[in-house]
Image (cartoon, rainbow, N blue to C red):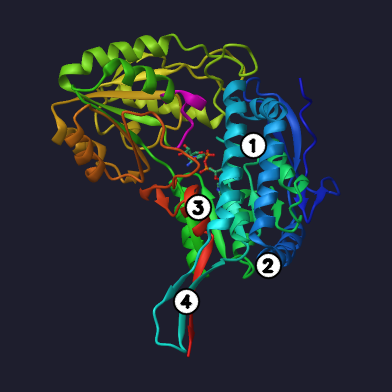
């Protein structure tokens, strides 16, 4: 087993720790034990990072696309080579099963590989003008970016937060979650080892609100990129507005899953039941509200419960475990509150509904059915191992339920009627929709939401263009 690494800030390529800096413990969510000590950046550290970011941007914006691409490709290769070690570190600080952690690390490599290709696909446009005149649109990197990443996908979130900016020619200061620092540091280390100038990508930790306020107050930072809750996203968007900084906001969701009577129910169950409990449900695109058409409700609910009861829960480092603990102590507290609130409002508790064991942050995979609209869990993102299965009369009612909430991140629909598939695609208010499929994430597709789920994109061509600004050039 790999030792949990010592932790540090990464500023201008220097690994900084100690020297009187405040620290914070990193906990193993399977045991609750402290496994590491994380140094927190001082205001002077953040100022140094800002100065470096300004220098890094000046150099990196001028780097040839081939150079940027070769760094990203090299880093992806290193991530693949180090995936076994990084996965062990991730499971120990975040809790997810080892196989999921390894898969995530490989996906992080795929993201960097995709971004490497995009470096060479940043095109401008030339407009028709009379001879002797010229008009063109160029795309330039927006500038140094401050990025804030959460703890649920400690490698993918970092690959997204830094891959687009690096491809575009920006510099980036990233503040990963203080709860999963080692996976983030290991990801950025791959970039540095692949030849990225250290001023281009730096890593800081601290009290989140203090770090974001400090970085955002600086005129050096030209864009904010945040992934996390809608509440924090609104707060950061308001701060960014004070200085008219650009923003990308990847916020919460409350994934509706529409199951129609004409769907292949067994395939829907085999795909969606495990999906709802991947990463213990701590996924922004998690399928949460199963909106099931009357004739197949009983079959779907029974099949779902059977599959959920068969899930093996345990320490993610153990063989065969399919669901680990929640990532922090806030998780089971929140789910416990939401489940009892749902039951008090008349929901049926089909399975789960309790903590497991007396160490770590385990909560049993839980299914609630016939949950009334006024229960908290029908309106707030649970972000945990709970699925809601409710019965509806038909398409109109189901669509209304899917669009009832202010969130619009991922939506899923299962139906074999192609006309209905198209109708749903047009009418569901979401940034991403999967029809007869379980995934909404692909490296070459834009990832992002509408309404309270945020704005802007990561991944895909859009993920790079989100780090660029258009410049109109008129030559007389
Ligand atoms: P939170 O909203 O306090 O934190 C979410 C993330 O934002 C953390 O990584 C945190 O470090 C960071 N953060 C918090 N305040 C910040 C600030 N002022 N400036 C910069 N970064 C800041 O909540 P949490 O308890 O960690 O998670 C609770 C909820 O957040 C979840 O229930 C879920 O709805 C949402 N969440 C969403 C995602 C996602 O992928 N969209 C990821 C993690 C959490």
- State yes or no: Cβ of the residue under disc 1 lies below 8 Å from any atom of ligand 1: yes
Highlighted range, magenta: 276-284
The residues tagged by marks 2 and 4 sit, at their Cα atoms, a distance apart of: 20 Å
Q: For the residues carrying marks 3 and 4, which lies nearer the camera in this image?
A: 4
Give left or right: position of 350 versus 118. Answer: left
Please tell me which residue is depicted at 64% across the width and 59% down the height of the picture.
65
Per the image, the residue denoted by label 3 is: 463
Q: Does the magenta run of residues contain 207?
A: no
Mark positioned earlier in the residue sequence (3 or 4): 4
Which mark, residue 62? Answer: 2
Report x, y in % for residue 143.
60, 66
Please tell me which residue is depicted at 38% across the width and 43% down the height of the picture.
409
The residues tagged by marks 1 and 4 sit, at their Cα atoms, a distance apart of: 46 Å
Mark positioned earlier in the residue sequence (1 or 2): 2
Q: Does the magenta run of residues contain 280?
A: yes
The residues tagged by marks 1 and 2 sit, at their Cα atoms, a distance apart of: 35 Å
Report the residue that reaches farthest toward the right. Answer: 19
Report x, y in % for residue 380.
37, 37
Q: Tell me if label 3 and label 1 are in contact, CB under 8 Å.
A: no
The residues tagged by marks 3 and 2 sit, at their Cα atoms, a distance apart of: 20 Å
Per the image, the residue denoted by label 4 is: 136
Q: For the residues carrying marks 1 and 4, which lies nearer the camera in this image?
A: 4
Front residue (pair 73, 41): 73
Per the image, the residue denoted by label 1 is: 179
């Amino acid at each position: 087993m790999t030792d949990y690494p010592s932790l540090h800030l990464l500023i201008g390529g220097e690994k900084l720790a100690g020297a009187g800096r405040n620290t914070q413990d990193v906990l193993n969510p399977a045991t609750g034990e402290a496994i590491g000590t994380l140094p927190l950046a001082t205001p002077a550290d953040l100022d140094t990072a800002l100065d470096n970011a300004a220098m890094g941007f000046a150099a990196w914006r001028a780097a040839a696309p081939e150079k940027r691409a070769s760094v990203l490709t090299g880093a992806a290769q290193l991530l693949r080579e180090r995936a076994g070690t990084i996965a062990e570190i991730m499971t120990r600080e975040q809790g997810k099963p080892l196989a999921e952690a390894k898969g995530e690390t490989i996906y992080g490599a795929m993201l960097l590989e995709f971004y490497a290709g995009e470096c060479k696909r940043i095109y401008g446009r030339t407009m028709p003008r009379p001879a002797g005149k010229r008009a063109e649109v160029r795309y330039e990197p927006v500038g140094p970016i401050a990025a804030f990443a959460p703890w649920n996908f400690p490698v993918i979130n970092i690959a997204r937060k830094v891959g687009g900016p690096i491809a575009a020619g920006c510099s980036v200061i990233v503040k990963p979650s203080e709860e999963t620092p080692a996976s983030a540091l290991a990801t950025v280390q791959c970039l540095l080892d692949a030849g990225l100038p250290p001023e281009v990508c730096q890593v800081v930790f601290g009290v989140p609100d203090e770090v974001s306020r400090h970085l955002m107050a600086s005129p050096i930072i030209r864009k904010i990129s945040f992934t996390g809750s809608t509440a924090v996203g609104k707060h950061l968007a308001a701060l960014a507005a004070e200085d008219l900084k650009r923003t990308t906001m990847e916020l919460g969701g409350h994934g509706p899953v529409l199951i129609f009577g004409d769907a292949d129910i067994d395939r829907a169950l085999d795909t969606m039941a495990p999906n709802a409990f991947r990463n213990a449900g701590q996924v922004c695109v998690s399928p949460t509200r199963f909106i099931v058409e009357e004739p197949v409700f009983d079959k779907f609910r029974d099949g779902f419960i059977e599959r959920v009861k068969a899930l093996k829960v345990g320490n993610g480092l153990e063989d065969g475990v399919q669901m680990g603990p929640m990532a922090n102590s806030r998780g089971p507290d929140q789910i416990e509150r939401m489940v009892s609130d749902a039951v008090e409002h008349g929901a049926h508790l089909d399975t789960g509904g309790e903590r497991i064991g007396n160490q770590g942050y385990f909560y049993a995979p839980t299914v609630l059915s016939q949950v009334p609209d006024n229960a908290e869990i029908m309106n707030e993102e649970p972000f945990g191992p709970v699925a809601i299965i409710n019965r509806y009369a038909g398409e109109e009612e189901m669509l209304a339920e899917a669009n009832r909430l202010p969130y619009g991140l991922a939506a899923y629909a299962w139906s074999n009627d192609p006309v209905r598939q198209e109708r749903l695609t047009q009418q569901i208010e979401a940034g991403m929709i999967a029809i007869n499929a379980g995934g909404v994430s692909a490296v070459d597709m834009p990832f992002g939401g509408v309404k309270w789920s945020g704005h802007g994109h990561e991944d895909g061509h859009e993920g790079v263009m989100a780090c660029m600004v258009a410049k109109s050039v008129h030559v007389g």
